[in-house]
């Protein structure tokens, strides 16, 4: 069963589906870390660049299929559709929150 996502995650996915970089970035802490496609992006400037690059390249949308709180991390399975081979695909998102901000995000298969 899918757990109700906290506000920072619902905001992130809604903004991602609109391709709204500013709204996506707004829920990350200034010193957050993102790991995706084998690379780590630290801090707001690097995360913005990652968001702009991947949004322009893939134009993805994400349908949350499942979510669960696992210790201090949220694990979200998302059905991701966009401009990439094997679309749609299910990806796993692991979020760590600090208050009402995303402190860490790891994306993988």
Image: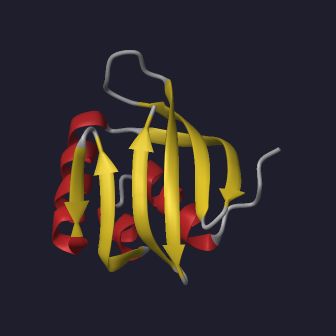
Give left or right: position of 100 versus 45: right
101 shown above or below 106 = below
The single residue placed furthest to the top in the displayed view is 86
The single residue placed furthest to the bottom in the displayed view is 99
Question: Residue 59 in the image: x percent, y percent?
Answer: 32, 38
Front position in the image: 49 or 31: 31
The residue drawn where x is 21% and y is 37% is 57
Give left or right: position of 45 versus 63: left
The residue drawn where x is 23% and y is 54% is 40
28 shown above or below 90 = below
The single residue placed furthest to the right in the displayed view is 1
The residue drawn where x is 39% and y is 64% is 24
65 shown above or below 70 = above
Give left or right: position of 42 versus 73: left
Question: Residue 16 in the image: x percent, y percent?
Answer: 43, 53
Task: Name which quarter of the figure residue 21 lies in.
Answer: bottom left
Give left or right: position of 8 versus 55: right
Where the N terminus falls, by quadrant? top right
Q: Which colour scheme appears in the figure?
A: secondary structure
89 shown above or below 69 = above
The residue drawn where x is 43% and y is 74% is 27
Question: Residue 66 in the image: x percent, y percent?
Answer: 69, 42
How many marks on residues? 0
Question: Residue 49 in the image: x percent, y percent?
Answer: 16, 58
């Amino acid at each position: 069963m899918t757990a109700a996502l906290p506000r920072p995650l619902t905001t992130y996915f809604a903004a991602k589906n609109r391709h709204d970089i500013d709204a996506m970035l707004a829920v990350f802490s200034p010193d957050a870390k993102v790991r995706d496609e084998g690379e780590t992006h630290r801090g707001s400037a690097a995360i913005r660049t990652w968001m702009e690059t991947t949004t322009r390249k893939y134009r993805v949308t994400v349908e949350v299929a499942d979510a669960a709180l696992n210790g201090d991390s949220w694990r979200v399975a998302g059905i991701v559709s966009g401009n990439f081979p094997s679309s749609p695909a299910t990806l796993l998102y692991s979020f760590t929150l600090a208050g009402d901000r995303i402190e860490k995000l790891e994306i993988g298969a």
